[in-house]
Image: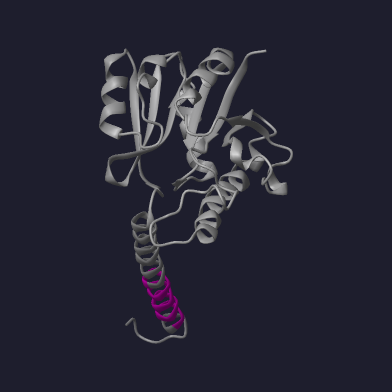
């Protein structure tokens, strides 16, 4: 059966097995596992509403097999061999790409997705022309790849652990593709990335407080005028 669309979440390291998790610099294994698993659980929560309309497939390290949270017990999961993330390309090509029109690959350590963004990606892929959509993260990283045709050439030699945006874009440009780039995503590879995330969230919070203060001032001015006072 050929599906119209599919989403694949790629976990490149163990997330739930505290003994096997890759430690973030400056964090112990328990906290590193907490951060890894939180990222994956966030994706699972976001994709919950999509599971009823399209296949959502998780590629999870085999060392996590006995440590999966209950939230994943009804999910489609492929346990991949540890230490060989490049086998992902072969599995996707053989089992999924040929059976699906529109494919979206999301790295599990990425941040910045919403339901609206995912719908936008699939809207961009919903044309007859060959389309590639790339999520550009900070520091020239890649958070996702979407495509609607057989794009095997762009995956040749890809380093799934740290895919490079410029390299991926160059490969996509070699084909007859319409290319879209969506920006402002983040990839969590180390403690510095979490520090950057914290700084970005702090900026948004400050902007949010500023907007709230401005709204409050506008409401006060409107109320003042409505009471018959001169305009401030």
Q: Residue at x 44, y 61 (%)?
A: 27
Q: Is residue 26 above or below residue 149?
A: below
Residue 26: % across, % down: 39, 62
Dominant secondary structure of the residues highlighted in magenta in the image: helix
Q: Is residue 192 left or right of residue 27?
A: left
Q: Residue at x 47, y 22 (%)?
A: 89
Picture quadrant of residue 55: top right
In which quadrant of the rendered image does the N terminus lie? top right
The question of residue 52 being in magenta is answered with no
Residue 203: % across, % down: 34, 65
The question of residue 216 being in magenta is answered with yes
Residue 212: % across, % down: 43, 72
Please state which of residues 170 and 87 is positioned toward the viewer in this rendering. Answer: 87
Q: Is residue 14 above or below residue 197?
A: above
Farthest residue, direction front: 19
Instruction: Please give the range of residues in magenta.
Output: 210-223
């Amino acid at each position: 059966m050929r599906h119209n669309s599919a989403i694949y979440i790629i976990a490149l390291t163990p997330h739930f097995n505290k003994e096997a998790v890759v430690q973030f610099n400056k964090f112990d294994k328990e906290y590193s596992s907490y951060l890894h698993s939180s990222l994956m659980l966030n994706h699972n929560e976001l994709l919950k509403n999509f599971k009823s309309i399209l296949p959502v497939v998780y590629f999870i390290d085999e060392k996590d097999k006995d440590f999966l949270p209950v939230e994943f017990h009804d999910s489609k999961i492929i346990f991949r061999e540890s230490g060989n993330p490049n086998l992902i390309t072969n599995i996707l090509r053989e089992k999924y790409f040929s059976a699906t029109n529109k494919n979206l690959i999301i790295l599990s350590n990425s941040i910045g997705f919403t339901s609206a963004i995912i719908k936008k990606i699939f809207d961009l892929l919903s044309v007859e022309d060959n389309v590639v959509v790339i999520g550009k993260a900070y520091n020239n990283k890649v958070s996702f790849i979407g495509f609607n045709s057989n794009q095997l050439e762009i995956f040749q030699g890809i380093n799934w652990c740290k895919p490079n945006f410029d390299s991926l874009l160059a490969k996509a440009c070699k084909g007859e593709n319409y290319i879209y780039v969506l920006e402002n995503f983040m990839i969590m590879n180390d403690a510095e990335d979490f520090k950057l995330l914290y700084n970005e969230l702090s900026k948004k919070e400050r902007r949010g407080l500023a907007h709230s203060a401005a709204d409050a001032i506008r409401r006060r001015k409107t109320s003042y005028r409505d009471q018959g006072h001169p305009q401030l």
